[in-house]
Amino acid sequence: MAIEKTTNKLYWKISATFLFLLILVGVTYILISTYTAQNYYQKVSQKLQANLAESTIKEVRPFIDGRLDTMAIQDIMHSMMVINPSVEVYLLDTEGRIITYVAPYKRVQLDRVDLDPVKTFIASREKPFIKGSDPRHPGEKKVFSAAPIVEGDALRGYMYIILASEEQSAVSSTLFGSYMFSLGSKLFFITLISSLIIGLLAIWYITRSLRNIIGVVRRFKEGDLKVRIAPADSRDVPVLGETFNEMADSIVENIDQLRSVEMLRRELIANVSHDLRTPLAIMQGYIETLQIKEEQLSVAERQRYLQIVLNSAENLSHLISQLFEYSKLEAKQMELQKEPFFIGELAQDIYHKYQILAKAKNINLQVSIPRDIPLVFADVSLVERVLQNLMDNAIKYTPEHGDVTITLESVNGAVEVKIANSGTAIPDEEQSYIFERYQQSRATRDGKGAGLGLAIAQKIMELHNATIRVRSKINEGTAFMFRLPEWVG
């Protein structure tokens, strides 16, 4: 029902707009037709009566011995207007001043006529369509006939005849207006009704596609995210259908991403809750023991319990720091501070930092750095963090009397860093997801840590447009490798 109401509103809005345009076009058409018809009538009238002034001069001599024959002129002018009421006759001197005239009711308001159109008319053999001054209506132009009055070899003046007199214009306007109203109204209403019917049918046909589109949009709004506008339903407005389908695909993709983020959020909460619960539980247990058995415990036992609480607190602090660091990396809130530096010196620093820890576990720690290793261009502090995480991982999972090796090698315009350790290998099926957060290999999982070290290292490498690769084989151990671009100064 709502779809039908919406479509009906659109249909009637378009129909009303179409009707308004039809009326506007119809009125414009009538005005243009009226103007064109009037000009056509005047042009025909001037063409037919172009020689009227010249013929009049041949019938009567306006000047005799240089003097105006007023009686003769008045008689002929009056006779002409009786026979043809649509004309007004004027006699002009050589400057265009009106010498005499015959006009109804003597309502002449000008005493001079512009001679430029008169001379142009007389000079042209074809007698072009041209308008001249109307002495009875200043500012108006009307068709005319004109001829020079010559006595002997002297120009005495001009015969100037208005072919559309005021009376003729009044009668013509009345009759023409009535005729045009009658004819125009009939044609207008017939055209209007026909066009309206055709237009309404066309609009209904076009809005049919819109009704289909609105139905699809309504279903999408109600939760049917798989519905799309078929090409057949939007053939009249294909851009609208294609745009909606693209928008729907984008919305569905965003919803899927939000769902994925929500799942990750729940997973984060679950993992964090589990990882935080363990050290907190240990701390709570030993602190309660200290409170309950304070007098029963020896000094050595209290010191041992406090050391366990301290270790758990440090583990908790380390875990929280990792979570914070990973969240910043995942939200892309870290900005790289790239600079050229000696990766060999950084590797040596890492080697010396972990040497004591390696000796404590009876691990053989080695480093291999060629002398010609070039500078690299990267964020030195973040690269150091990657090396620390990889070394923590290597030391942690290398058995006693095992080997850990740091190797640098120049390869195709980059420096490859490899940290390898002997010990338990990572199964092939698990190598694809060990860089995901909270993921640890079943073969190396010991219940300690949150599995964020490798995830953080991989995120840092992604910021450098690089990636960490892993190679692990049974009885050989595991190696993690990444490359940094050489500095080209």
Image (cartoon, helix red, strand yellow):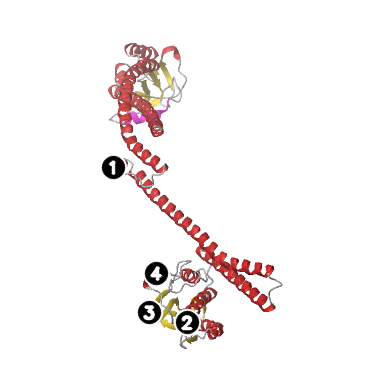
Q: Magenta segment range?
A: 113-123
Task: Tell me the element at label 1.
Answer: helix
Marks 4 and 3, the one that precedes in the sequence: 4
State the CA–CA distance, disc 3 to disc 2.
14 Å
Residue 248 visible in the snapshot: yes
Residue holding disc 3: 474
Amino acid type at mark 3? Ile
Q: Residue at x 67, y 79 (%)?
A: 300
Q: Which residue is mark 2?
A: 399
Q: Nearer the viewer, mark 1 or mark 3?
A: 3
Residue 124 position, x and y percent, is 30, 31
Nearest the eye: 209 or 369: 369
Of the two numbered discs 2 and 4 in the rendering, the one whose residue sits closer to the viewer: 2
Q: Which residue position holds label 4?
A: 432
Do the CB atoms of the residues marked 1 and 4 lie less than 8 Å apart?
Answer: no
Which quadrant is home to the N terminus?
Answer: top left
Whole-percent x, y for residue 479 in the image: 42, 79
Q: Alpha carbon of mark 1 to alpha carbon of mark 4: how far?
A: 45 Å
Q: Amino acid at mark 1?
A: Ala
Give how far apart the Cα atoms at labels 1 and 2 are.
68 Å
Residue count near mark 4 (Cα–Cα under 10 Å), binned few <14, some 14–19, many ≥20: few
Which tag, 3 or 2, sits closer to the chain's start?
Answer: 2
Q: Which amino acid type is shown beneath numbered disc 2?
A: Pro
Cα separation between marks 4 and 3: 17 Å
Residue under pointer 1: 232
Secondary structure of residue under mark 3:
loop
Using the numbered discs, state the Cα–Cα distance from disc 2 to disc 4 in whole angstroms.
24 Å
Determine whether the residue tagged by mark 4 lies in a helix, strand or loop: loop
Q: Left or right: where does residue 443 sit relative to residue 46?
A: right
Q: Which numbered disc, 4 or 3, marks the residue closer to the eye?
A: 3
Number of numbered discs overlaid on the protein picture: 4
Q: Is residue 143 left or right of residue 407?
A: left
